[in-house]
Amino acid sequence: MKLNKKKIIAREFLTLIACALVFGLAFICTIPYNYVIESRIEKLETTSQSLSDSINKIQIHFSPKIDKQKEFFEISESNRWHTKQWTYKELWSRLQKLNEKDSLKFKWNNEWSSGLKKKMGDLLGFKKLSDFEDYIENNSLTPKEVEKNASAEKLIDERENIESKIRTEKYKLLDFDDRLEFSLICLIIIGVLSFPLRYLFYAIKWSIKTLKQNEQ
């Protein structure tokens, strides 16, 4: 085999080795990348857990009341007892006002149908108006609890923001298939660029050699 052909084969082999190295390095680089992302997620999860502990500590004494309010809202909404687009807090505030102004009694006796009251009794255990009034009174927050709950809700908003960041960070993590895909993309880019650049390098090298020969 002529020396010139051996050189060509050697260059092609070196190019192949270089591409393999690029693929391997690209794949290995995804390890520290994932490590950095996982470290961010761990810090965010620690913060989220700390906020959850603070929220539970604040709401521990009146969270059963909030659960009852949400339960009533869900039952009310699923049975279409109200037509307005209220949140559970808005609906409960409305019930409190009706109870405080004695308007609840009027609605119970004059506006609400017997079918509605029976349905409420079956689902929530109200046998008479006083049961409903006691239910509202027992599950309404005191002014002090309202103040504490407002602080807890700020923490809840902050926690939701952090959980959103956690989801975003988790989306950035690369699984094995993603890492392979990234490495292949790098290999293809290097491969596509290496061939025209290589021949450009050869052309420049040949041109310089030719100019030197002319000078001699």
Image (cartoon, grey):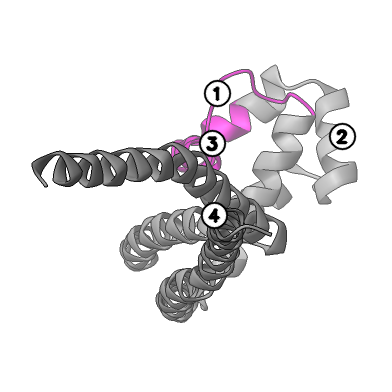
In this view, the residue in front, 10 or 75, is 10
* N-terminal label among 3 and 4: 4
- In front of the other: 142 or 19: 19
Q: Evaluate if marks 4 and 1 touch, with contact meaning CB atoms under 8 Å apart.
A: no
Cα separation between marks 4 and 1: 83 Å
Label 4 environment density (alpha carbons within 10 Å; few <14, some 14–19, many ≥20) = few
Q: Residue at 27% of width from left, 41% of height from top?
A: 204
Q: What residue would you read off at disc 3?
A: 91
Q: Earlier in the sequence, mark 1 or mark 3?
A: 1
Disc 3 element: helix
Crowd around label 3: few <14 · some 14–19 · many ≥20 (10 Å): some
Q: CA distance from mark 2 to mark 4?
A: 95 Å
Residue where numbered disc 2 is placed: 119
Q: CA distance from mark 2 to mark 3?
A: 18 Å
Dot 2 alpha-carbon crowd within 10 angstroms: few under 14, some 14 to 19, many 20 or more = some
Q: Nearer the viewer, mark 2 or mark 3?
A: 3
Residue type, numbered disc 4: Asn
Residue under label 4, please give it.
Answer: 4
Gap between marks 3 and 4, in whole Å?
88 Å
Callout 1 crowding tier (Cα within 10 Å): few <14, some 14–19, many ≥20: few
Whether tag 2 and tag 3 are in contact, CB under 8 A, the answer is: no
Q: Earlier along the polypeptide chain: callout 2 or callout 3?
A: 3
Q: Amino acid at mark 1?
A: Gln
Magenta residue span? 79-106
Residue position for label 1: 85
For marks 4 and 1 on the same chain, the one whose residue lies earlier in the sequence: 4
